[in-house]
């Protein structure tokens, strides 16, 4: 059994005060890519709405991750990686 410090799940990291960000612009790009690949009848806006409705709790959705990173850099410490 893993201890809390060994658990790398999003939920465990959130209990350790890790804040996750989701880029709205990227979510829109993913919706358009899904339509192109799978051809759903939905509009991109509806797919984005559905994706965001099913995002893990307490994920902060930002308009553009590039802008968010710039703000975080100006504030001090942060780590950035994609998953």
Image (tube, rainbow, N blue to C red):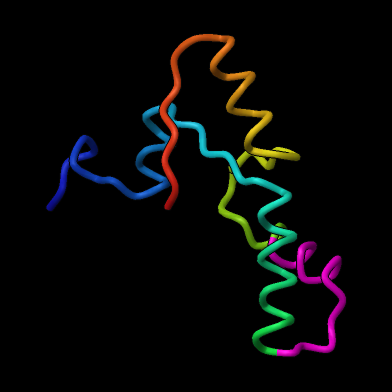
Compared with 65, 42 (above or below) is: below
* Viewer-nearest residue: 37 or 18: 37
Q: Is residue 76 left or right of residue 70?
A: left
| Residue 69 image position (x, y, % from top left) | 58, 27
x 86%, y 66%: residue: 45
Instruction: Report if residue 1 lies within the magenta region.
Output: no
The chief SS type of the magenta part is helix
- Residue in view at x 75 percent, y 67 percent: 50
Residue 83: x %, y % from top left: 42, 53
Q: Residue at x 84, y 70 (%)?
A: 46
Indicate the quadrant where residue 36 lies. bottom right
Residue 66 horizontal/vertical position (percent): 63, 34
Q: How many marks?
A: 0
Q: Is residue 62 above or below residue 49?
A: above
Q: Residue at x 63, y 38 (%)?
A: 65
Tell which residue pokes out farthest to the top in this image: 75
Front residue of 47 and 32: 32
| Above or below: residue 67 compared with residue 55 | above
Stretch in magenta: 39-51
């Amino acid at each position: 059994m893993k201890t809390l410090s060994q658990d790398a799940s999003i939920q465990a990291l959130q209990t350790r005060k890790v804040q996750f960000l989701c880029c709205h612009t990227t979510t829109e790009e993913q919706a358009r890519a899904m339509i192109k690949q799978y051809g759903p009848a939905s509009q991109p806006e509806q797919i984005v709405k559905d994706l965001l409705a099913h995002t893990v709790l307490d994920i902060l959705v930002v308009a553009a991750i590039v802008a968010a990173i710039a703000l975080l850099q100006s504030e001090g410490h942060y780590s950035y990686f994609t998953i």
